[in-house]
Image (cartoon, helix red, strand yellow):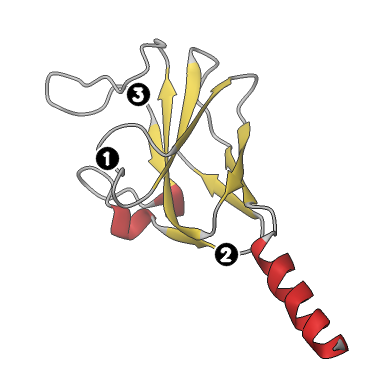
């Protein structure tokens, strides 16, 4: 009976574990104009609109850190935008090049828009910290 009770307790605690936190830091914000937008994405939402969780942060110095709470384990990517004019979107030059600084998890910055395959990471049953550069 003790063994059965132990097994049930382990199974219940496994399913009742709180979701994880994901802390994201940008350390090289160019100036204090505007705000920084952070978006947590799945493959389905990446580069297609808002993330599954979104946070905007005021800028005070060169470093901005946010924490996404209650994130279920899974495969995700982070997109970050320094929204200098606070219009909640990326602005582009006439040539099509971005006017505002941006970044993605894994700091994957090749030519063209970020790709989920390069920016993805796995969040397991532990809290995680990510650093992103613009």
Judging depth in this view, the residue of 77 and 114 nearest the camera is 77
Distance of label 3 from label 1 (alpha carbons) = 16 Å
Q: Determine which residue is flagged by label 3.
A: 100
The answer to which of marks 1 and 2 sits earlier in the sequence is 1
Judging depth in this view, the residue of 19 and 134 nearest the camera is 19
Location of residue 54 in the rendering, given as x and y in whole percent from the top left corner:
47, 31
Q: Residues within 10 Å of mark 2 (few under 14, many from 20)?
A: some
Q: SS for tag 1?
A: loop
Q: Determine which residue is flagged by label 1.
A: 47
Location of residue 15 in the rendering, given as x and y in whole percent from the top left corner:
64, 64
Which quadrant would the C terminus be assigned to in this image? top left
**With respect to residue 124, does 92 lie above or below?**
above
**Residue at the far front in the pictured view:** 1
**Residue at the far right in the pictured view:** 2
- Residue located 75% across and 82% down the image: 7
**With respect to residue 82, does 8 lie above or below?**
below
User: From the viewer's perspective, is 122 left or right of 103?
Assistant: right
Distance of label 1 from label 2 (alpha carbons) = 23 Å
Q: Determine which residue is flagged by label 2.
A: 124
**Residue at the far left in the pictured view:** 95
Q: SS for tag 3?
A: loop
């Amino acid at each position: 009976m003790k063994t059965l009770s132990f097994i049930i307790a382990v199974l219940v605690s496994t399913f009742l574990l709180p979701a994880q936190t994901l802390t994201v830091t940008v350390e090289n914000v160019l100036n204090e104009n505007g705000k920084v937008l952070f978006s947590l994405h799945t493959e389905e939402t990446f580069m297609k609109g808002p993330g599954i969780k979104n946070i905007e942060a005021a800028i005070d110095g060169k470093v901005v850190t946010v924490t996404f709470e209650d994130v279920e384990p899974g495969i995700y990517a982070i997109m970050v935008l320094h929204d200098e004019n606070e219009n909640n979107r990326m602005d582009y030059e006439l040539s099509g090049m971005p006017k505002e600084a941006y970044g993605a998890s894994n700091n994957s910055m090749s030519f063209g828009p970020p790709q989920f395959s390069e920016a993805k990471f796995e969040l397991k049953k532990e809290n995680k910290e990510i650093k992103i550069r613009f």
